[in-house]
Amino acid sequence: MLIYIPFYDIISIKKVISMDYFDYKNGKLYAEDVDVSMLAEKFKTPLYIYSSRTIIEHLRKIKSAFKEFDTLVCYSVKANSNISILKLIAEEDAGFDVVSGGELFRVLKAGGNPKKIVYAGVGKTPEEIFYALKTGILMFNIESVEELQTINKIAKNLKIKADVALRINPDVDAHTHSYITTGKKENKFGINIILANSLFNTAKKYKHINIKGIDMHIGSQITIIQPYIDAIKKLKNFIEQIKSFSKNLEFFNIGGGMGIIYKDEKPATAAEFASEISPYIKDLNLKLIIEPGRFIVGNGGILVTSVIYNKKGINKNFLIVDAGMNDLIRPALYGAYHSIIPVKQIKGKNILYDIVGPICESADFLGKDRHLPDLKQGDLIAIRSAGAYGFVMSSNYNSRPRAAEVLVQNNKYKLIRKRETYEDLIKLEI
């Protein structure tokens, strides 16, 4: 069972419910039973730290919520693709949702079962399709007619049949950031229902395709259930029509996108989500696929960074830290909020800061207008809820080596990615 640990924000003395295992002990921040400041001293900063316990329990939580169905939970690799994280998830007998040949390669290296891999994405290249077919994945999620034709052609050359699901764009507003909504008709994702219906009617001409499922995915960081219900209701009539003349339909993939707590969101729990959508899917008698990513790993990671300078200004005070937008781009890209806390609790008056990095861009900030103690050079702060879309979206902008990553399990820890060096920055250049 997932344990909800009370965490006290020393800035506002406001109690927040934390869905992770990062908490203060004797005034020092711990990742499970490991001292965060010790890890920062050993592996330097910026440093990503992940909690195995948080990740595993979130995965088990969603599995338990959907246990009444024949459900395959396919972790969305794009959220966090470190091989050690993937291995942790594979050992829980989960499947994987991949969107590139590189993600497929990672999953296989981590021990993922090919028969539990769903391949999504609008731009699968012929080379990637060939690789996935040779690997023997569960199915592709089809996003266009030309993609279906391409897969059919490659499968013909391989003298096999490819299992696919049609990704339907239900034209439903997920009420999330415009950059991460995927189920509206103006989005590049999916096929409209009218076209999908015609594809089923002409499916016989694709001799090397088995249409095994219907897929939907309406966005990410969705905190309310109603958009899922609206989308499922739209697809349900379509599915029932298809089942009346197709014996091959086996799967209904409802995608992922379940939100987490970053600030004051109140997302549905896995149990609430399952309970609310259950009446709309239980009589379809199809195997269920669900593709959570952020829900599993989002609150399972923090980014630890050191204060370089405490810059006091006339209108603004700045904490200049050694992590920048190249390490965590979400605040710059989406205006995303991440809670920021000191690694060691410090008594005294709090000061209003913008927390900024060393990148030569005004967009390089990790948080604005945050109350923190009067921190000194070398003090550590932690950016919370950084387990999803953190390191995986990082870059070498400004020729900055990417951060190290550490995985904690109880009182043990291991380095799961070395910090890049200057030599790493140029090793592929000629």
Image: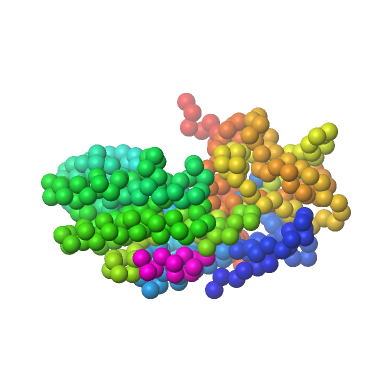
Q: Determine which quarter of the picture holds residue 189.
A: top left
**Image location (x, y in percent) of residue 293:** 47, 55
Quadrant of residue 408 within the rendered picture? bottom right
Q: Main secondary structure of the magenta part?
A: helix
Q: Residue at x 63, y 48 (%)?
A: 337
User: From where the camera sits, is residue 61 visible?
Assistant: yes
Question: In the rendered image, which quarter contains the N terminus?
Answer: bottom right
In screen coordinates, is 122 left or right of 29?
left
| Chosen colour scheme | rainbow
Is residue 257 toward the left or the right of residue 312 in the image?
left
Q: Is residue 365 above or below residue 204?
A: above
Q: Is residue 273 magenta?
A: yes
For the question of whether residue 159 can be seen, the reply is no
Q: Decide if residue 19 is on the left or right side of residue 76.
A: right
Is residue 206 one of those drawn in magenta?
no
Q: Magenta segment range?
A: 269-280
Going by the picture, which residue comes out furthest to the right? Answer: 348
Residue under the image location 48 percent in, 32 percent down: 428
Which residue shows up at 22% across the image and 54% down it? 211
Residue placed most toward the observer, 258 or 192: 192
